[in-house]
Image (cartoon, rainbow, N blue to C red):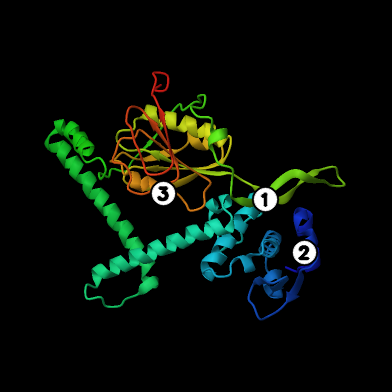
């Protein structure tokens, strides 16, 4: 396939007028010294044979990708940071922006869907923390396998250790399920004893059941979130019609601009004491919060089961919840990312209070009283209407 870099550049600018002033100063240079394409300063270098072998979409994607690196000044913003993690974070954020605009990510490109909700600094912190956790896990496991402290595979061993750990967790779960099955066969009346055993172990029991909540519906907000939610400290690129361009064909095209985007993370208590009616109340409040902020929602009992991106009410309707064990509020405290604007915990308040400080909004439903260190506690009485 032949290519025309000048024509390709014009095509990208017609799709992204935001790049106009930036692309005017960008020079594109052919070179055989690199295998693909890269940006350096205000220049883009590319291997002509590589570009010629790509589809129209891939050519558009790669040039747009490199222009984004230049426009967002990723080179200077990444100084002092781990270069591999920073480059991955920058690629992840850019690729999701381009994917949202209809370009397919080139095969082998970084594709982390959750990156769309972060700027590069935020996503860098997430990836850095994950790397440190993997290194810590690798070190702990190596210490177990090498009591004498002999040196081993280091970072290169970490992924294999993580895989082993996942397999062990799956095996443990199978053993637990097998034990419960055997218990039921020996004495069918033991089901009540099993539930009581979980209750007595609140705070450290693990069940990891999955469940869905049907007919969530809507309800008036229990809290005036417009007042309570903080204004965003995060900014990101997004398409805006505030300064839209009217093209010759009469089509109004949005402009890529840096705008303030509020971000909220919510962790839901899904421990054994939270029934479907209470979960339904949690989710109705999540719908109310969604009107004022970007939203991520995750579940916890004694473990945190990860955040899910919530963009529409339908995403809430289709959520699947994990949990059913004891309650560990320290798990909830540690679940939040570093630079999110608003942190909210929805819970029945049943469980030991957390040890760690967290600047968050604790919303408790029911009769239990909780006094965590830091943040704001809002108590909601559960009326008969709330329990439907």
How far, Cα to Cα, is label 2 from label 1? 19 Å
In front of the other: 197 or 157: 197
Determine whether the residue tagged by mark 3 lies in a helix, strand or loop.
loop
Compared to residue 48, the image places residue 59 above or below, namely above
Q: Is residue 341 visible?
A: yes
Q: Are marks 2 and 3 in contact (CB under 8 Å)?
A: no
Which quadrant is the C terminus positioned in?
A: top left
Crowd class of label 2 (few under 14; some 14 to 19; many from 20; radius 10 Å): many
**Going 56% across and 52% down the picture, which residue do you hit?**
118
Tell me which label, 2 or 1, sits earlier in the chain: 2
The residue singled out by tag 2 in the image is 23
Residue 318: horizontal and vertical position, in percent?
A: 47, 36
> Is residue 39 rendered to the left or right of residue 308?
right
The label shown at residue 312 is none
For the view shown, which residue lies furthest in the bottom direction? 33
Quadrant assignment for the N terminus: bottom right
Location of residue 52 by image quarter: bottom right
Marking on residue 335: 3
Under tag 1, what secondary structure? loop
Disc 2/disc 3 C-alpha distance (Å): 41 Å
Q: Measure the C-alpha gap from mark 3 to mark 1.
A: 31 Å
């Amino acid at each position: 396939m032949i290519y025309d870099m000048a024509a390709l550049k014009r095509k990208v600018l017609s799709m992204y007028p935001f790049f106009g002033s930036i692309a005017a100063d960008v020079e594109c240079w052919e070179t055989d010294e690199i295998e693909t394409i890269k940006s350096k300063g205000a220049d883009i270098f590319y291997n002509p044979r590589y570009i010629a072998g790509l589809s129209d979409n891939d050519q558009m994607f790669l040039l747009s990708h490199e222009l984004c690196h230049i426009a967002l000044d990723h080179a200077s913003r990444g100084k002092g940071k781990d270069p591999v993690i920073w480059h991955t974070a920058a690629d992840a954020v850019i690729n999701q922006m381009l994917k949202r605009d209809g370009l397919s990510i080139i095969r082998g490109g970084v594709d982390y869907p959750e990156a769309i909700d972060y700027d590069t600094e935020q996503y860098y912190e997430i990836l850095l923390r994950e790397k440190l956790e993997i290194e810590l896990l690798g070190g702990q496991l190596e210490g177990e396998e090498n009591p004498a402290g002999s040196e081993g595979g280091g970072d290169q061993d970490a992924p294999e250790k993580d895989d082993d750990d996942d397999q062990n967790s799956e095996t443990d779960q199978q053993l637990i399920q097998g034990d419960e099955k055997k218990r039921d066969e020996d004495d069918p009346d033991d089901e009540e004893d099993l539930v009581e055993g979980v209750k007595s172990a609140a705070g450290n029991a693990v069940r990891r059941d999955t469940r869905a909540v049907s007919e969530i519906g809507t309800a008036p907000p229990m809290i005036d979130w417009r007042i309570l939610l903080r204004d965003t400290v995060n900014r990101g690129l997004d398409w805006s019609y505030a300064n839209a361009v009217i093209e010759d064909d009469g089509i109004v095209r949005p402009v890529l601009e840096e705008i303030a985007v509020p971000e909220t993370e919510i962790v839901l208590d899904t421990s054994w004491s939270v029934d479907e009616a209470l979960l339904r109340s949690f989710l109705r409040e999540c719908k109310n919060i969604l009107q004022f902020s970007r939203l991520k929602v995750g579940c916890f009992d004694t473990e945190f089961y990860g955040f899910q991106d919530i963009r529409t009410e339908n995403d809430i309707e289709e959520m699947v919840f994990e949990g059913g064990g004891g309650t560990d509020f320290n798990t909830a405290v540690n679940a939040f990312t570093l630079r999110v604007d608003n942190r909210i915990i929805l819970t029945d308040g049943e469980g030991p209070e957390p040890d760690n400080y967290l600047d968050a909004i604790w919303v408790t439903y029911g009769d239990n009283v909780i006094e965590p260190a830091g943040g704001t506690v809002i108590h909601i009485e559960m009326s008969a209407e709330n329990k439907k």
